[in-house]
Image: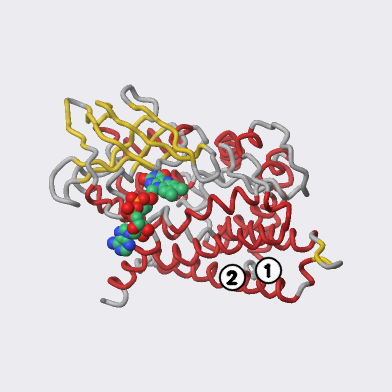
Amino acid sequence: MAALGHDPADEEFRQEVRAFLRDRLPADMARRNGQGFHASRADTRAWTRILHEKGWSAPNWPVEHGGTGWTLTQQAIFDEECTAAGTPLLDIFGLSMVGPLIFTFGPGELKDRILPAFLRGEISWAQGFSEPNSGSDLGSLQTRAVIDGADYIINGRKIWTSGAHEADMIFCLVRTGEGSRNGLTMLLVDARASGIAIRPIEDIRKEHSLNEVILDNVRTPVANRIGEEGKGWGYAKALLERERAFAAEIPRNRHHLATLKCIARETMRGGKPLIEDNLFAARIAEAEVEFMALEYMTLRAMADNERGGPSFGSFLKIRGSELVQRITQLQVEAMGDHGAYLYSEHAHRAGEPQPAPGPDFAPGIWSEAMYRRASSIYGGANEVQRTLIAKQYLEL
Ligand SMILES: Cc1cc2nc3c(=O)[nH]c(=O)nc-3n(C[C@H](O)[C@H](O)[C@H](O)COP(=O)(O)OP(=O)(O)OC[C@H]3O[C@@H](n4cnc5c(N)ncnc54)[C@H](O)[C@@H]3O)c2cc1C
């Protein structure tokens, strides 16, 4: 499927990545992550440490900040090979969102203190933006921070905070002044600070991935502020653009497409493999063509953005989130009866046996398809993205 890396230097790079994955990716980690469940924080951390030893834990960062300095093609090749090998996905909250904000807007002291530990896999992040009455209308958020000596004191409530229960730090958008957007500031908060209560929210699968975070007189040092006070909206916008570009879900869509083909090859329907059913094969082909178009659109948008052009985050977010929903639905359909049983992610992570019989690829399929129903909501609801496109590009 991949058309990337026809250049001999790229092909050499691909062989280097393959050899590294063969030598260093633990087989049990690859097996766990090949089954469609979310990677555990423990696996993500362990894999980040392994990558860090090779200098590869930040594939999309510039060299001067501890990244690889790879070209976009090299990043895409690395991503393809990692997907094929079954590595856990890296911490996107740190790698693609808050990390670049820290090294871009500083201050330098914060960069030196936080980023090396993150690159070693020692800090995992959660995103504290949404509040009970401020999701799409983020600028109306009410969590307030006031300066007291060398600290900010924070009071308020965040909601839908993915992974906060397993995170070390939360990057929070808080109100430090009036005005819907001018009065916002971005602070990094220790997830275990005194005054923080993290309450679980069960997701559609009855799993614990989401949280409500209550901040009651929580202190964080002024030194943990990204950039300037009151400029948080600008930083959040830069971050959300990155989040939406990431929401094209290229690694995840690639992985799910490969799994879909594997299921269709191994599942018999009407006496022959499902992949030989012309109608089903056409649906897979359609999804694959859309994936390839999305991948190239993403690479082009990233290249344009590096040259100072627009990032097209809203377009990528809509297409990527719709595609991940379609491919995971096709997986469930392809599994027939086995698609009907919801395997438990927490039992899987705990290594507990699951009662239902089924092929090796069955466990995470339905769970993932259910979870991704939310992909058109998280990262900014698709309806809102369509309005942004209408305003920004169509001048409506
Ligand atoms: C699985 C999941 C994980 C999440 N993880 C995080 C996280 O880690 N950190 C974090 O900060 N947040 C997270 N979120 C929150 C997410 O960003 C918000 O749910 C999202 O921005 C929508 O906000 P809301 O839920 O308040 O819905 P609302 O803003 O109340 O919207 C409700 C509905 O109204 C529609 N709507 C609202 N305004 C408009 C408009 N102007 N035009 C047209 N339609 C509109 C929306 O499309 C939506 O369908 C997560 C959400 C989910 C579901």
Q: Is mark 2 within 8 Å of ligand 1?
A: no
Q: What residue appears at the point 31 percent right and 24 percent down from the top-left corner? A: 195
Q: Is mark 1 within 8 Å of ligand 1?
A: no
Q: Secondary structure at mark 1?
A: loop
Q: Residue furthest left?
A: 178
- Near mark 1 (Cα within 10 A), the count class, few <14, some 14-19 or many ≥20, is few
- Residue 83 shows in this picture: yes
Where is residue 121? Give x, y as percent: 52, 36
In front here: 205 or 185? 205
N-term mark: 2 or 1: 1
* Left or right side of 54 for 220: left
**Residue at numbered disc 1:** 1
* Left or right side of 268 for 292: left
Where is residue 353? Give x, y as percent: 73, 34
Name the amino acid type tagged 1.
Met
Circles 2, 1 touching at the beta carbon (< 8 Å) = yes
In front here: 342 or 18? 342
Q: Secondary structure at mark 2?
A: helix
Q: What residue appears at the point 69 percent right and 57 percent down from the top-left corner? A: 259
Distance (Cα) linking label 2 and label 1 = 8 Å
**Residue at numbered disc 2:** 292
- Residue 239 shows in this picture: no
Name the amino acid type tagged 2.
Met
* Left or right side of 248 for 76: right
